[in-house]
């Protein structure tokens, strides 16, 4: 009887172990936050007569904020819908991902990845998104989604020029009349201006315009800006982005002179005539120029140039037997400098 009880206990224990051991994992393991990349946020695209090229920046950090050293692969997801069947409120039918090789992350130079495809059909709306992976089980969340309607795009604008002005840049280009396949455009074109500062990514500024010129205001003097122009036409309410122009660069310059000095006064001394004035309140004043005009002269003569910290000059070479008049200007730090208009003339006080 004892032996049978022991045997039953062994069988029960064995069955229990078998049940526990056969459970396994019912879902994939969750990767730690220290290996999951941050989502890509700058997915962009450019078009050509052959297709579309996607590009984006390598993630540099995990969702935990730790540095990434490399990306194993990128998953590129694509969806295509006939324009006539497109439903804005319906889920986007993304297909199985295409894998693009990753590589070493270069945080200092913002390494970029790209993907090209030429399998596109006119009259269809395309969607793309990208995930970054550090392993088969650690993928980022979805990137931003880009979408476009495919049509043979228009060529990029040509003969783009950029002229510097004070805190602004004036752009112009010739109108586009041809598609990338050489055929005439069938739709009215507009143009989108894109700008880059300090070699950063080009971003659209303002709205697309039907004009072939654009003035970019509120710039910083002395900073170099680069521009590209993209052609766009509309197909059934969908914008078809065309080619990009060559990049042009321009550096706005300060063309605004300081205000003219005030309170100019001339006083007789034993050595000649001292000229005083009130310092300019403008912060970019480099110095002052003193002018003298004889009573019979129509134009004043430059007789001195002093630094901005000085607001006095003594003229020891005064012409004899004639009345003289003095005026002062302020000039700034530009090269060449911007000079103010002349102050009111001052004669000797007796």
Image: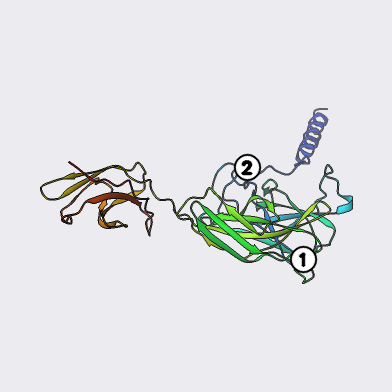
Q: Is residue 309 left or right of residue 220?
A: left
Q: In percent of the image, x 69 and y 52: which residue is there? A: 208
Instruction: Place residue 262 in its image quadrant.
Output: top left
Indicate the position of residue 163 as horizontal and vertical percent values. Answer: 53, 60
Q: How busy is the neighbourhood of tag 1: few (under 14 within 10 Å), some, or many (20 plus)?
A: few
Q: Is residue 112 left or right of residue 22?
A: left
Q: Quadrant of the C terminus?
A: top left
- Which numbered dot is residue 32? 2
Residue of label 1: 118
Of the image marks 2 and 1, the number of the one nearer the N terminus: 2
Residues 270 and 277: in front is 270
Q: In percent of the image, x 60 and y 51: which residue is there? A: 59
Q: Secondary structure at mark 2?
A: loop
Q: Secondary structure at mark 1?
A: loop
Residues 79 and 51: in front is 51
Q: Is residue 218 left or right of residue 194?
A: left
Alpha carbon distance from label 2 to label 1 = 37 Å
Indicate the position of residue 271 as horizontal and vertical percent values. Answer: 11, 50
Q: Is residue 103 visible to the viewer in this orientation of the structure? A: no
Residues 293 and 273: in front is 293
Q: Is residue 229 visible to the viewer in this orientation of the structure? A: yes
Indicate the position of residue 327 as horizontal and vertical percent values. Answer: 29, 49
Q: Is residue 225 left or right of residue 205?
A: left
Residues 59 and 217: in front is 217
Q: In percent of the image, x 72 and y 49: which residue is there? A: 145
Q: Residue furthest left?
A: 270
Indicate the position of residue 125 as horizontal and vertical percent values. Answer: 81, 54
């Amino acid at each position: 009887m004892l032996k049978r009880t022991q045997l039953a206990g062994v069988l029960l224990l064995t069955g229990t172990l078998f049940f526990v051991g056969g459970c396994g994992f019912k879902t994939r393991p969750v990767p730690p936050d220290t290996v999951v990349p941050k989502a890509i946020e700058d997915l962009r695209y450019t078009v050509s007569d052959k297709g579309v090229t996607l590009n984006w920046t390598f993630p540099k950090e995990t969702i935990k904020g730790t540095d990434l050293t490399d990306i194993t692969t990128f998953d590129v997801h694509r969806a295509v819908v006939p324009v006539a069947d497109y439903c804005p409120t319906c889920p986007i039918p993304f297909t199985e991902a295409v894998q693009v090789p990753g590589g070493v992350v270069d945080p200092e130079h913002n390494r970029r990845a790209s993907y090209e495809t030429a399998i596109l059909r006119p009259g269809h709306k395309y969607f793309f998104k990208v995930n970054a992976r550090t392993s088969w089980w650690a993928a980022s969340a979805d990137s931003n989604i880009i979408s476009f309607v495919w049509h043979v795009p228009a060529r990029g604008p040509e003969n783009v020029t950029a002229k510097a002005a004070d805190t602004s840049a004036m752009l112009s280009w010739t109108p586009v009349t041809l598609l990338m396949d050489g055929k005439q455009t069938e739709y009215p074109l507009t143009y989108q201006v894109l700008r880059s500062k300090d070699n950063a990514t080009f971003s659209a500024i303002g709205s697309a315009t039907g004009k072939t010129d654009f003035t970019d205001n509120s710039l910083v003097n002395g900073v170099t800006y680069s521009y590209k122009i993209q052609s766009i036409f509309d197909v059934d309410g969908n914008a078809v982005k065309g080619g990009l122009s060559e990049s042009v660069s321009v550096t706005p310059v300060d063309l605004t002179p300081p205000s003219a000095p005030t309170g100019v006064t001339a006083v007789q001394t034993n050595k000649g005539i001292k000229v005083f004035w009130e310092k300019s309140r403008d912060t970019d004043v480099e110095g002052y120029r003193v002018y003298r005009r004889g009573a019979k002269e129509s134009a004043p003569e430059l007789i001195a140039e002093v630094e901005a910290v000085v607001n006095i000059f003594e003229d020891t070479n005064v012409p004899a037997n004639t009345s003289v008049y003095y005026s002062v200007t302020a000039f700034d730090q530009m090269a060449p400098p911007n000079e103010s208009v002349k102050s009111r003339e001052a004669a000797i006080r007796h």
